[in-house]
Image (tube, grey):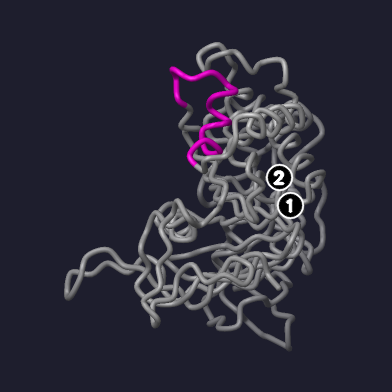
Amino acid sequence: MSDLSVKNLTLEYGSGASANPILKGVSMELQRGEVVALLGPSGSGKTTLLRAVAGLESPKTGSIQIGDRVIFDGAKNIEIPAEHRNLGLVFQSYALWPHKTVNENVAYGLKLRKMPAAEIAVKVKEVLNQLGLGHLGERYPHQLSGGQQQRVAIARALVYNPPVILLDEPLSNLDAKLREEARAFLRELIVRLNLSALMVTHDQDEAMAISDRILLLNNGVIEQQGTPQSMYETPHTLFTAEFMGSNNKLRGRVLQRDGDKAVIEVNGRQLNATVRGANMSQDATAIIRVEKVRISQTPSANAIELPLTTCMYLGNRWECLFGHAGEGIRAYAPQRLEAGNYWLQLDADKLWLY
């Protein structure tokens, strides 16, 4: 049995002719020990879905089930209040009580459940030790770093051993360097404690690093779902291909097609490509990941010749732009390139047509 099951969930703001649909029949499962990331652009419905599971939004139709317990069913008029759903929730802002110590913040939910003080102390100490915070129990939030505050928020969500934890962009308040460290910590913690987690993020790198499965939402529906590797390497739609990874987008005209192989014309050059889109027309869009473009100073097969415009230093490599921004092609190089024309090889199996 799934730890979390969502079936055909719809949710809208407003009513009647002015109703604004946010979720349009979303279904998903979360298995024991699995981390699922809800990924998508602003307005796609990912945060609304998380809040509906938490009980902070009221869906219109569909059902939500935690284990064998139904917490929402539109047809049966069942809607369990948020405080009785027994879910751990980590907010984007952490939402720590500034006037309470770390121990008091973590213990707060247990006190609301009328748990004996001695048992609360044991559970708080145990969860703080698990997160490396055991020595900070008497400090206040303003005495902690951003990463420590985040861990206190996670401890508060874990202390009563909920079946599912919900993470609402848990790393977004951290700076870039600390976010990388927290990402590794969070993944290690989830694996070590065998947690089931549903996480909202707008950061694709974060989603791929932490989750076992990604649900990519687009305008209230699931565009595609799968493992991070499958989402990145085999996107089914142009939206998925563009959202996942750093890409070059080329407009072209299809000259011929044979199954999943095609020849397209781009800026007067004929290129072999691989068809990925199910409803591709004669005027198609080709996508190739930036890291898949190969740079050559001599004419190459399946390549476009363009002048070097600029190179940007990224630390472990250079990102080079050939042609004009928006219409050119980007590629990575191990060192800064000299000015001049280059051939950009676009291997047919890496050049995806939609």
Q: Residue at x 31, y 67 (%)?
A: 12
Quarter of the image holding residue 276? bottom right
Mark closer to the observer (2, 1): 2
**Disc 2, disc 1: CB below 8 Å?**
yes
State the residue position of label 1.
Answer: 344
Residue 162 magenta-drawn? no
Is disc 1 placed on a helix, strand or loop?
strand
Question: In the image as oriented, which residue stretches furthest toward the bottom?
Answer: 258
Q: Quadrant of the C terminus?
A: bottom right
Q: Earlier in the sequence, mark 2 or mark 1?
A: 2
- 95 to the left or right of 270: left
**Image location (x, y in percent) of residue 201:** 56, 48
Q: How many marks?
A: 2
| Dominant secondary structure, magenta | helix
Q: Residue at x 70, y 61 (%)?
A: 213
**Image location (x, y in percent) of residue 140:** 53, 15
**Image location (x, y in percent) of residue 289:** 69, 54
**Image location (x, y in percent) of residue 237:** 59, 71
